[in-house]
Image (cartoon, rainbow, N blue to C red):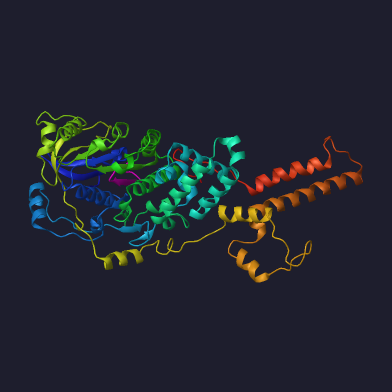
Amino acid sequence: MYTSDNKLYVAHGSNGPICLCGKMANRHGLIAGATGTGKTVTLQVLAETFSQAGVPCFMADMKGDLSGISQTGQLTGFIEKRCAEFGIENPPFGGSPVCFYDVFGEQGHPMRTTISNMGPELLSRLMDLNEVQAGVMTILFKVADERGLLLLDLKDLRAMLNFIADHASELTKKYGTVSNASVGAIQRALLRLEDQGADKFFGEPAFDIMDLLQCRADGKGIMNVLAADKLMLNPKLYSTFLLWLLSDLYVRLPEVGDQELPRLVFFFDEAHTLFTDTPKSLVDKIEQVVRLIRSKGVGVYFVTQNPTDIPDSVLAQLGNRVQHALRAFTPKEQKNVKAAAETFRANPSFKTEDAIMELGTGEALVSFLDEKGTPNIVERAKILFPLSQIGAITEGQRDQIVKSSRIFGKYDTMIDRESAFEVLLAESEAASPQPSPTGEGEETPTNTSSGEAKGSSKGSWKKSFLGKILMAVITSVTAALGTHVANTVTGKKSRSKDSIGKKVTKSAVSTATRTATRELTRSILGNLIK
């Protein structure tokens, strides 16, 4: 329950309420514990408390349980007992404002991105490419970015793969080896990705990350809940997609420093999937994003079974911790319990290592940062009960919430504008003209209907990459010739020793480059900087 002095009431210990300091909420956190110990309820309590404080949240819903945060809770025997223990009278039950999302568009608003925006590093991780194949993917993005070619969907990526395969020898001289074997392996990985439904989450309209940072008219932060039951069937897809969301937030949001409350809290459930089989180079970049994103006003809370699932470099940045019970039946599990206990500031009244194994459901060891950023002594506590419904909602309730959302219809219909596929196709057709059916050298009559069928959805030839270059050349030549004629009439001589032909060539190339191409720049994790 949120209090007016920016204290977030989360748990109750032997000395009374335990609160999370709003000013330190962007210093990230950890919710850990074995299956069935209460992690999901803890997440729900934290999220609805942030909502009451006016802080929007993002969370993935693995089993549908978190959808209940949208509905009003009820007084049960368990909650009535907790009220007596905590000294709470007449708890203000109520649901939080919720916006449902689904990568596949089945249980919420579609949530998709583009190939270009995801970038080569995250895409290579998603496709499980080895180091050599990832290098070829980096070259592919480099060529596309230098030419200003947008890779929006899978057909764009496939077109670029064909392009670099056709130009492998010249690209190898400039960037490094581009082998047919690597291109073939990437094409096969692309096919597997397509079989997993990637055609639904790569494309446009791409999700606008700013839609996550919304509050309702009454000031409550909106809970952005991603249906992840189907997404979790591919853990690497799930974790890569969430990592893209996190890195896009890092790219898009301005620096705000420490505020009284964060702008957004991002819950990363099943966090172990993010670091399993992840190259150290990428882990280092993840650490960098986690470290820097707090200055953008974003708090990241990792939810996992054991703290050892998180690399030490990332774990060290998680100052707010809730540790539920762990089981220790094997030497390895006992070692993990000891490691978890050592991450807390010790409490002289009990042994942390023993307490972790003694905790009941809904109990936890809690340690939050104080107002100066120093970890408090760990306390054994009982987690507050949610004011919203515990458990899943019905399909009818979900459908009603989706249709009443302010973004209903914004992402529902996919669009397909001109991108790498169309540009490369136009270049290929221009380079290999078809023979005239009416005789050699004779112009072929224009077929209006077929021409419109080919070009109507993508715009005229002037809007294509090749068309932009031709129009730029024509404009430059016309301007240069005009200047030359004017100088000849007035008797002026050019100061340059270059011929008129060289002038025209230089001007045309320069203008064409500025007009038709725009080199794209990328962030730490390869996201487009817009």
Residue 447 found in image quarter: bottom right
> Can residue 529 be seen from the camera position used here?
no
- For the view shown, which residue lies furthest in the front direction? 181
- The picture places residue 466, in percent across and down from the top left corner, at 66, 53
Residue 8 found in image quarter: top left
The magenta stretch spans which residues?
A: 260-271
Whether residue 323 appears in magenta in the rendering, the answer is no
In the rendered structure, the answer to whether residue 15 lies left or right of residue 498 reads left
Q: Nearer the viewer, residue 505 or 495?
A: 505
Q: Nearer the viewer, residue 275 or 14?
A: 275
- The picture places residue 169, in percent across and down from the top left corner, at 60, 39
Q: How many marks?
A: 0
In the rendered structure, the answer to whether residue 485 lies left or right of residue 226 reads right
- For the view shown, which residue lies furthest in the bottom direction? 449
Name the residue: 54% across, 39% down.
Answer: 178
Whether residue 262 appears in magenta in the rendering, the answer is yes
- The picture places residue 174, in percent across and down from the top left corner, at 60, 35
Name the residue: 53% across, 53% down.
Answer: 156
Residue 436 position (above or below residue 13): below
> Can residue 442 be seen from the camera position used here?
yes
In the rendered structure, the answer to whether residue 138 lies left or right of residue 360 reads right
- The picture places residue 392, in percent across and down from the top left corner, at 22, 60
Q: Nearer the viewer, residue 20 or 252?
A: 252
